[in-house]
Amino acid sequence: MSDQLKIDKITTDLLRSIRLNKSFMIWFGFLGISLVVCLGAYVLQLKDGLVVTGLRDYVSWGMYISNFVFFVATSLVGMLMSAVLGLSGQKWAAPLARIAEIIALAFAAVAGLVIVMDMGRPERLLNVFIHGRIQSPILWDVTVVTIYVLISTLFLYIPLIPDLKICYDKLDNLPPFARNLYKLLSLNWSGSPEQQKIIKQSTRVIAIFIIPVALAIHTVTSWLFASTSRVGWDSTIFGPYFVTGAFVAGSAAVIIAMYFYSNNYKLHDYITEKHFDKMGKLLVLVSLIYLYFNLNEYMVPGYKMKKFDAMHIQALFTGHHAVMFWLVQIGGLVIPIILMLFKKMRKPLPLMVISVLVLLGAWFKRYIIVVPTQEHPYLPIQNVPLDFKVYTPTLIEVLVTIAPFILVLIIITVLSKVIPIIPVHETIEQLEEHK
């Protein structure tokens, strides 16, 4: 096959997904209806207040804050895949970079909305910006989340510019307004050496800058917990502990997306078994580091067994939260690590199933971090109803918690239908480099 035919095949294969079809409309309709139901639950919460949830005076952070921590965590995968692996010269990760950036942008953009869902008076959010105090970790969190969303948008858009021009040139069947939009966003790209140099330099600068911002976003989130004296949160390792856990959740999310993109968009020639094998090894690496921090989190206070530490650990190991705790640790971390050590389990289907378990474990791990420690306050619980002592999410709370996931899927679905999932321009460049 001649080089031009190969280029034409690459372009056709990678632009094939940019179209509206019946399966897309069915899927998008399902997401839309589900979102309306969940937003209806949120309207009830706005009308009646947080009393419709399981949140009370003692457990005031429940599923909503667990969700926020999870969303912030998963958003770090863009930095891991595009910045860390890209700057270290891991070329195998190049076809997966855009998938990671789409996931990162979707989760980071929705993370801020999750915080709003936890507020009884969301109209007061503006006060964080107007009357925010530099001493408050909440102000830091809002600031770094906003900056990270902006940088993630640039990190997705700037390397995308050449592909937008290709979309304008090749997608003749699109409506005129859509083609004109591609032309506008491509910023008169012509592929000149000067333009290519600007794109590469800009991408490299953003890749360097996004690393400290991405580390800050989850470190600051960890400080929201660690800056208190509550048992279970009063820890000096929460910063790196949260960051490594974020890499685990993000890597699992990318593997799941790889599997569905590869099968639904017929991208087996571009997302190969080699990529799944490499991602499986990466997931093992970050999971082992995360397992080390998990051991530190419980071994040190468990060895000293101070009064309130003992109450907290006993509640996790043998008490009310024991089943969830051990399922998270063993089913969501230990067993996946052992399975992924075998090459057969790093094939697409088994690795995707393992990643689903890891991602579920990652969410419930945030629940384990957020909720149990609030059920053991320093002051004794006296003369209060049972629902003040034990946190139980309500149906409305569960529906509102699901809403951000639906929003993330909508964002990912829309982006997947308007831009190439695999970088077209870079794939063609690699072809030409290997002549």
Image (cartoon, grey):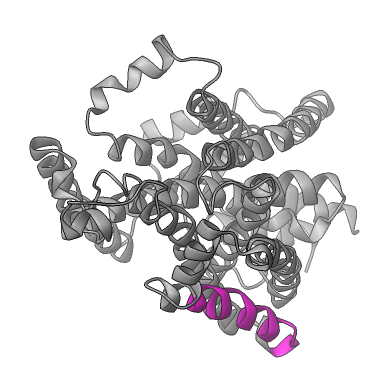
Tell me the chief SS of the magenta region: helix
In the rendered image, is residue 296 in sight?
A: yes
Q: In this view, does 352 lie above or below 395?
A: below
Residue 131 in the image: x percent, y percent?
Answer: 41, 10
Name the residue rendered at 62%, 51% in the picture: 242
Nearer-the-camera pick, 394 or 111:
394
Quarter of the image that includes the N terminus: bottom right
Quarter of the image that includes the C terminus: bottom right
Nearer-the-camera pick, 341 or 229:
229
Q: In this view, does 263 lie above or below 26?
A: below
Asked if residue 120 lies left or right of residue 358, the reply is left
In the rendered image, is residue 162 in sight?
A: no
Residue 38 in the image: x percent, y percent?
Answer: 20, 52
Q: Is residue 175 above or below residue 434?
A: above
Residue 206 in the image: x percent, y percent?
Answer: 72, 30
Q: Magenta stretch: residue 340 in it?
A: yes
Q: In this view, does 291 lie above or below 142?
A: below
How many marks the image carries: the answer is 0
Name the residue rendered at 27%, 61% in the picture: 390
Judged from this view, the residue extending furthest toward the top is 130
Q: Magenta stretch: residue 121 in it?
A: no
Residue 333 in the image: x percent, y percent?
Answer: 61, 74
Name the residue rendered at 55%, 25% in the picture: 140
Q: Magenta region: which residues? A: 326-344
Instruction: Say which quarter of the image contains residue 44.
Output: top left
Name the residue rendered at 44%, 53% in the picture: 370
Nearer-the-camera pick, 180 or 289:
289
Instruction: Say which quarter of the image contains residue 372.
Output: bottom left
Instruction: Say which quarter of the image contains residue 364.
Output: bottom left
